[in-house]
Amino acid sequence: MTSTPIELQGLVRKLVDSWNDRDEEAFAALFTPSAEYVTGEGERRRGRQEIARLLRESPAGLHVVVSEAAADGDARGGTVSFPWTAARRGGTVRQGRITCVVVRQDGRWLIETLQNDEDA
């Protein structure tokens, strides 16, 4: 990829910022209309509406932090993967790795599939 890794870093930043801001609309808009989100518990959510509902159902007060994402692919699609930690006052609550299949649609990157592999 040429400039794509930088663009995908931006996608990851928007994903984490919208999660931390609990902005359901902004979060869901980062996914394709038919996207699939697989939670750390293995639950599958399909479509933007179901994915947005994750924010409503997630515990309040968690703040997600990520390290730099690794990206691979071409100008039309690829993958991006990054480690995450969700912290609450008093320490780390959860952590894991997210891997996304991404596609370029209408001039922007969107997530087609997100797999959350949460550490036990």
Image (cartoon, helix red, strand yellow):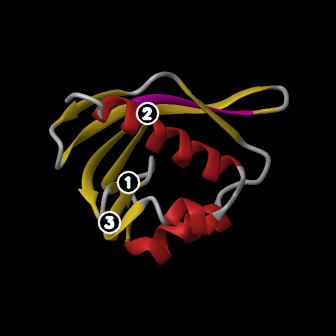
For disc 1, the marked residue is 42
Under tag 2, what secondary structure? Answer: helix
- Mark 3, Cα crowd under 10 Å, few <14 / some 14-19 / many 20+, is many
In this view, the residue farthest toward the right is: 89
Choose between 2 and 99: the one closer to the eye.
2
Under tag 1, what secondary structure? Answer: loop
Image x and y of residue 47, in percent: 38, 74
- The residue depicted at 41 percent of the width and 30 percent of the height is 82
- Mark 1, Cα crowd under 10 Å, few <14 / some 14-19 / many 20+, is few
Q: CA distance from mark 3 to mark 2?
A: 19 Å
Work out whether 24 lies above or below 67: below
Residue type pointed to by label 1: Gly
Q: Of marks 3 and 2, which one's residue comes earlier in the chain?
A: 2
- Residue 9, which numbered label? 2
Residue type pointed to by label 3: Ala
- Is 20 magenta? The answer is no
Between disc 3 and disc 2, the foreground one is: 2
Q: Of marks 3 and 1, which one's residue comes earlier in the chain?
A: 3
